Image: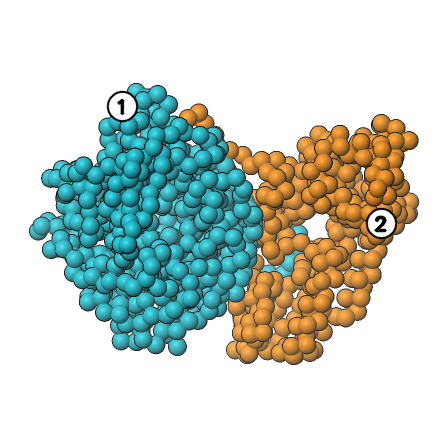
Chain colours: A cyan, B orange
Amino acid sequence: MYLRIAGLLFGCELVAASLACQTLHEKTPAINVQRTQLERQGIAGDWPSYNGDYTGRRYSSLTQITPDNVKTLRTQWVFHSTSPGILEATPVVVGGVMYLTASNDAYALNASNGTVLWHYLRPISSGLVDDASGHISRGVALWGDRLYMETDNAHLLCLDAHSGRLIWDIAYATWNKNYGATSAPLAIRGKILVGTSGGDDGVRGFVTAFDAVSGKVLWRRWTIPAPGEFGSRSWPGESYLRGGGAAWMPGTYDPELNTLYWGTGNAAPDYDGSVRPGDDLYTASVLALDPDTGRIKWYFQFTPHDVYDYDSVQTAVLIDAEYQGQPRKLLIEANRNGFLYILDRVTGKFLSAARFAERVNWASGIDANGRPIYTEVQPSAKGTLTCPGDAGATNWFSPAYNETTGLFYFVSLDQCTINSVRPEAFEEGKEYYATGTREEPDTPGKKYLLAFDRNTNQLAWKYAQEGNTHSWGGVMTTATGLVFFADDANSFEAVDGHTGKPLWHFNTGQTLHASPMSYSTGLKQYVAIASGDDLFAFALP
Amino acid sequence: MTLEHKYQVAMSDVDCDERRKSRVTRVRSRESGLFPRSHIRRFQHPLKRLSNAIVCVALALGGTLHAQQGANGNGTVSNPAAALFDSTCAVCHGSDGRGGERAPNIATEREMVKLSDTQLTTILNKGVLASGMPAFGFLGDEKIKHLVAYLRQLQGLGGSDQLMLPGDPAEGEKIFFERDSCSSCHMVHGRGGFLSEDLSAYAHGRSVPVIHAAIFHPASILGSAGHLVDIHTADGTLYRGLVRARDNFNVVLQGEDGAYHSIARERIQQMTASSQPLMPEDYAAKFDEKRLNDLISYLLQSAASEKTDPPTNEEEN
């Protein structure tokens, strides 16, 4: 707030302070994220939620940075985190303030120069298992003047976005200590939606909706059915309590259809399918949920009876486009299992699948109903070469869709692993893979930036990456046809979205484990991405 | 929630120790010379620093001073357990239990805080001879029980039923949120304003006299941090708010609506801090002893409840 006229100044110190300040909360707060902003497509200056908008396209309408001038892009500022975990968050930006999480900490930064405006400090938790013990937090959700984040031990925190003060703290998965959380929450229509990590550790996955103001639980949608429910035949005895299907990334949302699209993780135990016969609903699936009740409108299971660790939490990207001559509401997902799927998102009907991974040996293809045609490849006591490997042909890092180029961009990994099985009993406090994987000897993996053309159902271009396959970086795209992505050798790059030709790069000096975004403040377009312990913001000179 | 899980907000909390540290920082920033000297003076007058230092020393002297003030009828809290602590423990451990020259911090040191009531009672009864802690068994069980309870209060621990409160916390809550509108600037457990410090855990490890002093003499605690600042820029814009960040190139003010404004120093024509702190300075005149005790009790109880685990939404799975 600034005021040009002295008479309008707020004067807590001029009048009796307590009286003057009493009116503070009746005024419109500076940060006030509303439904209209979150539901808008073609986001511009602000980047108000994890994927920018609810469609998951990671598409920015900003046009200042173009293929012609991108070569002059330079670092504007760097933020360094001292939290224990590396940064995997996508920051959100509203009104020139950037919100970022690092482990259990949250920061508000001046988006034009990186100055820390506030820092909510919360120590990491001890005694966590597997992914949660990495203390990863992928970001925040905003609703009104409040900020929401998940902690490593699966608490949902509500902070005052103006100051970082804690408003409430709710532990939402306390009955099995193998639960954790790594995701950014999703805010829609006064609700905050969260899931958990722990799908490799014998938890029962769920998505829960909280009232954004009170923190009251509105519904919980288990991703593993209880005895007697549809799909429960896969879960004899108490196995449903540790069947996995963790919902560990934010979903996407279609306001018009009032439908959430939420991905679920692998079945547990990962490699021992003998204790969970059948398809293992609703693991390795996308669930179309009614956000008011949590009811499943439809589901699509990418990898029934998953014994390969093929979580399906990759972003389900929502696109309205012509498909085979008909305007359709589509859902596109490049899946960890090596195939790219197109579904009708109104009905869940399978439309097509295309193999994008170089080597796929667990399935010979996808049938007309969208079901994999399995091969004999299964984890074995000695170990079985399985392609894609346990890291998947792609993973949680963001894909992007650009309606100007009509192409869908994502990073893939060509890598196989040798997967072994050894039955084991669930034990709280321990992972529940039922053995594990090792690298394929003498065959290093390779990463690619891929551009998929939904009209031809083929790749438009493919950009092979040098590197050690250790990067976990995502993609975003802009209205000028640029594609920004994290490469596999520490650099953040911009390529021409039509051709894949590299136009600019910057060596961050660290492995990238995050997805990029773009915003503007002070009439300047920025592109930002976290790398290692740092967040870099770039703009034209 | 354990002590490790206690959250903090970086731009919070100023006590005497921190005041000493922050003074050093301010002197250094003045040496940078990028800010006109006259404005610095207005921002933090050296005499004011001196007076702050005096108050800090006075606070460090602790209970004795306040007991004298109490005798003068200045509205000080009377609490028998506090008096017993002051006469028995404070000489070595400090009136707030945070340690003195001869004995360690027993209010916030984790190794101390995590001791059970039984362990504390044993230490009081038998002493810790190797470290010079005398045995106080002669006080009798009743008084030792009171001392343990009071120490828990200093630690901000224990359920509110174990707290020795000088007044009625329910009344204090009304004072905080309604009658005196502390909540227009301060937050407790998610309710209230963002301009000033979150007081949910403020009373943790703070004794009644220290809280009392903070309410009645806020200038001594807040220093310049609690003053509104006006920044006039060359183009005639006036910004008013609290300084949330500053470096050699920018000053960041947060206005009453919560908006942050980063103002480049080269744009700043004049920067002045209000002479009065945002926190009212007239509580000493307005508050009678009961009102003060009720408010302090609310803060103590709030800090104690901060120690409990957060609510869960557990259900049968």
Q: Residues within 10 Å of mark 1 (few under 14, many from 20)?
A: some
Disc 2 marks which amino acid? Arg
Residue located farthest toward the left when viewing the structure as drawn? A325
Looking at the image, can residue A77 be seen?
Answer: yes
Instruction: Give the total number of marks visible in the rendering.
Output: 2
> Toward the viewer: B83 or A506?
A506
Name the one closer to the observer, A89 or B208: A89
The residue under the point 14% across, 55% down is A458
> Mark 1: which secondary structure?
helix
Residue A233: which numbered mark, if any? 1
Chain ID for label 2? B
Going by the numbered disc 1, the residue's amino acid type is Arg
Q: Quadrant of the N terminus of chain B?
A: top right
**Which residue does the image show at 39% across and 77% down from the upper left?**
A541
Q: Is residue B276 above or below residue A244?
A: below
Foreground pick, B248 / A192: B248
Mark drawn on residue A106: none
Query: For the C terminus of chain B, which image quadrant?
Result: top left
Residue underneath mark 2 = B102
The image shows residue B105 at horizontal and vertical percentages of 76, 47
Q: Element type at marker 2?
A: loop
Residue at 37% x, 70% y: name it. A506
Whole-percent x, y for residue A56 in the image: 30, 51
Distance from Cα at disc 2 to Cα at disc 1: 69 Å
| Among the 4 quarters of the image, the one containing residue A527 | bottom left
Q: Is residue A233 above or below residue B282?
A: above
Q: Nearer the viewer, residue B157 or A377?
A: A377
Left or right of B33 on screen, residue A532? left
